[in-house]
Amino acid sequence: MSTHSPRAGAVTSVLAFGGIVVALMQTLVVPLISDLPALLHASTADATWVITATLLAGAVATPVVGRLGDMFGKRRMLLGSLGMLVAGSVVSALSDSLAPMVVGRALQGCAMGVIPLGISIMRDELPPEKLGTAMALMSSSLGVGGALGLPGAALLAQHADWHALFWVSAGLGAAVFILVLVLVPESRVRSGGRFDLVGGVGLTAGLLCLLLAISKGADWGWASGSTGGLFGAGVVILLVWGWWELRSAQPLVDLRTTVGRQVLLTNLASVMVGFSMFGMSLVLPQLLQMPTATGYGLGQTMLVAGLCLAPAGLVMMVVAALSARVTAAFGPKVSLMIGAAVIATGYGLGIVLMGAVWQLILVAAVIGAGIGFAFGSMPALIMAAVPQSETASANGLNALMRAIGTSVASAVLGVVLAHMTTDFGGYALPSEAGFRTAMAIGGGAAIGALVLTAFLPGRRARAATVSDGAVPAGPVPEGQSATQSTTSG
């Protein structure tokens, strides 16, 4: 790793831009959700596959691409992921029916590995004094892109043909691809070895069963045979997969590392923070768009609702740098605890402040600040506890935990809002009590993250902080974690 690379700023900017573009892709179809059945000549239930396909593909691809990046080159896999984003965007842009649209959206979902790959490239290539801020910005790009993408997509969908959304996505993906090709060097840190094909197939099958049951359970019925069968199959497959990984000489995921206290608790906290992040994106836009005649709705358009969430994305970006400074001074555990506490505070405000647009903007900004703090600290916690040669796969697993959190939030909060309703002109709309309950659950998830984080090791995880220059310059010897090689006491 070059400790004084003149390209450090360019590498950081390009990778963070790539993370934001990938996150933008996730919110691309939100303005079209109600119109998708008519646009794609499909039933409402079938049209939801446009969203489900992206979720499933991203969940499966992220840990697999991370492992391949550790083995064969992170930049190479980053370019491959961006290539799938461009290809998926073009396929979707040319689609007028459900099947090709689902294929295109699945290809777009495969690009979710860009964020953990980017964080790992930063660890390999950036000087220590720039690493903390860069990682925090890259990690928070998921929230930043999601918050900024909604108003942009709504504006474009309102004033142009809906296919333009995907042509813009393809253009942005191609721009990032070229920038990575020109400005981002290939890391020399490789783990080598042979890819665990059995582990890859097992993880894919287990995740597909679990996430499919979570995402489609509301449509199929939570007590239905399909939902229960998928849950059961997912649990059994993942148990067998874990048995295989523990006995594999070169596993897809090193479970012995992931069950260590620091990695395990950080990943569990990531599920909770992912839940809270998606809760904001699910609850606040609906409340903003609810008819004013309900007595609690604010009657805004999709575009205005998106613009109300945009400041949260800007706050995340600003707070990412602050998170890095706190991490440098006090350790990433403190940053994550601050983030979880701020998120919980934001949801607490949301329970009592939901009567005006400015109040919900404030709530979103506070929650966004907490997410920026939390996401900014997680890579430091993960990378301080794993060898440098496994950073991409470890960060990929952490990104998967966030995705699982968002999936669970979608299912849980969706059920709450679907069952706590009020009659409005013959239509069942989420009630005021339903929105307050959803916010309380989002805040509860943040408190859960805070409690989990409190049990993290108390010593500073110095391997990934910004001021002590302790980031390893090369692969850590086998069997020794980055924390062990760089942390005293």
Image (spheres, rainbow, N blue to C red):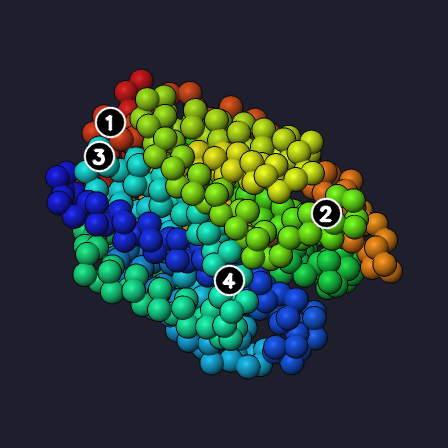
Q: Mark 2 points at which residue?
A: 297
Reading the chain from its start, which is encountered first: label 2 or label 3?
A: 3
Residue shown at 74%/63% (left/top)? 220
Tell me the CA gap for discs 4 and 1. 42 Å
Q: What residue type is labelled 3?
A: Pro
Q: Can residue 44 be seen in this view?
A: yes
- Label 4, secondary structure: give it: helix
Q: Which mark is residue 439?
A: none
**Residues at badges 1 and 3 in contact (C-beta under 8 Å)?**
yes
Which label was assigned to residue 128? Answer: 3
Q: Are marks 2 and 1 in contact (CB under 8 Å)?
A: no
Location of residue 41 by image quarter: bottom right
| Residue 165, horizontal then vertical, whole percent | 47, 69
User: Local crowd at mark 4 within 10 Å, few (<14), some, or many (≥20)?
Assistant: some
Q: Name the residue under label 4.
A: 155
User: Dot 3, how many residues are within 10 Å of its Cα: few (below 14), some (14-19), or many (20+)?
Assistant: many
Earlier in the chain: of badge 2 and badge 1, it is 2
- Of the 4 image quadrants, the one containing the C terminus is top left
The residue that mark 1 highlights is: 467
Q: In this view, does 84 lie above or below 248?
A: below
Q: Residues within 10 Å of mark 1 (few under 14, many from 20)?
A: some
The amino acid sitting under disc 4 is: Leu
Q: Nearer the viewer, mark 4 or mark 1?
A: 4
Q: Alpha-carbon distance for marks 1 and 3? A: 7 Å
How far, Cα to Cα, is label 2 from label 1? 48 Å
Closer to the observer: label 2 or label 1? 2
Q: Where is residue 30 in the image (x, y as percent from the top left)?
A: 57, 61
Dot 2 lies on which element? Answer: loop
Q: Mark 3 falls on what kind of element?
A: helix
